[in-house]
Image: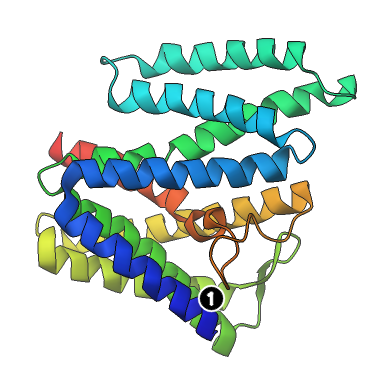
Amino acid sequence: MTTRLVAAAVGLAVLIPSLVFGGVLAVEIIIVLVSLVVLTEYAAMAFPDDRHASFAWLLLGWGAVYTAWLHGPQGAIAPTLGGLVLATLVFVTLRPGPELSRAADRAGRYVLGIGWIALLASFVGLRRFDDGLAWIFLVLAISWCGDTGGYFAGRFFGKHKLYPRISPKKTWEGVAGGVALAVVGVFVVRAVGLPQLSPAACVAGGAAACLLGVVGDLSESMMKRAFDVKDSGWIMPGHGGLLDRIDSVLFVAPAIYGYAVLMEG
């Protein structure tokens, strides 16, 4: 527990000032660095026997999607995604691996990894809004409060398993505790920087986004079981890999980005 707390404190000491004082550029630098680490972890999990070439392809595809989303002309993302699928099929055709029966699985792993991790670009999109910093802290509040509330509620009150086949430790009581604390976090962010959120939106949106985060956590757990690994990596002492820490964020951030577009677009 001490190692986990120290690692989290060090991470926050770097992250929070960068977000507050760095502007859009700082957020973009952080997201690019985080994405590189997560792509490395994903390549090691999904392609343990070919991680270097796989990482190169994942990075190339991620870069194309990221650039089209944030820096390309309007409408560039759709043809980019289509081109990604075609190019990945060509790449896998030229490098099908030792077992042709798993070629389709390899192609799917590439497309999944690129699209999944590219969702982090939504953080940069959020920061571009006038209230961008508040929107980012809304994502973090929902994710962190959901994880914290879920951990302690599950530890002290958890009795009914949520989805033992994928995540044996998660309980329905933990989910309820996470949702409750996430809604509190949303109200705090509303009070500080997003007064345009109605109380109903705080309750409904906070609960829905927190539940999305739970699904994100379960999805990453499912992937790790499919890849037969315990943690996505080792970069965060006591926490495993970076992907283990941001699995819920990868679902919450795009949802909040979409909501922000509707609110401020």
Q: Is residue 95 left or right of residue 77?
A: right
Q: Is residue 66 left or right of residue 70?
A: right
Residue drawn where x is 27% and y is 46% of the image:
27
Give the residue number, with chain letter if any, for mark 1: 174
Is residue 180 among the parts visible in the rendering? no
Residue drawn where x is 49% and y is 39% of the image:
117
Q: Name which residue type carries label 1.
A: Gly
Residues 257 and 171: in front is: 257
Image-quadrant location for residue 118: top left
Name the spot of residue 174 as percent of width and height, x first: 53, 76
Considering every residue shown, the one lying at the far bottom of the view is 156
Residues 67 and 51: in front is: 51
Name the spot of residue 182 as percent of width and height, x first: 35, 69
Q: Is residue 146 left or right of residue 102?
A: left
Q: Secondary structure at mark 1?
A: helix
**Quarter in which the N terminus is drawn:** bottom right
Is residue 11 among the parts visible in the rendering? yes
Within-10-Å neighbours for mark 1: few <14, some 14–19, many 20+: many
Name the spot of residue 70 as percent of width and height, x first: 29, 28
Considering every residue shown, the one lying at the far front of the view is 52
Residue drawn where x is 26% and y is 63% of the image:
16
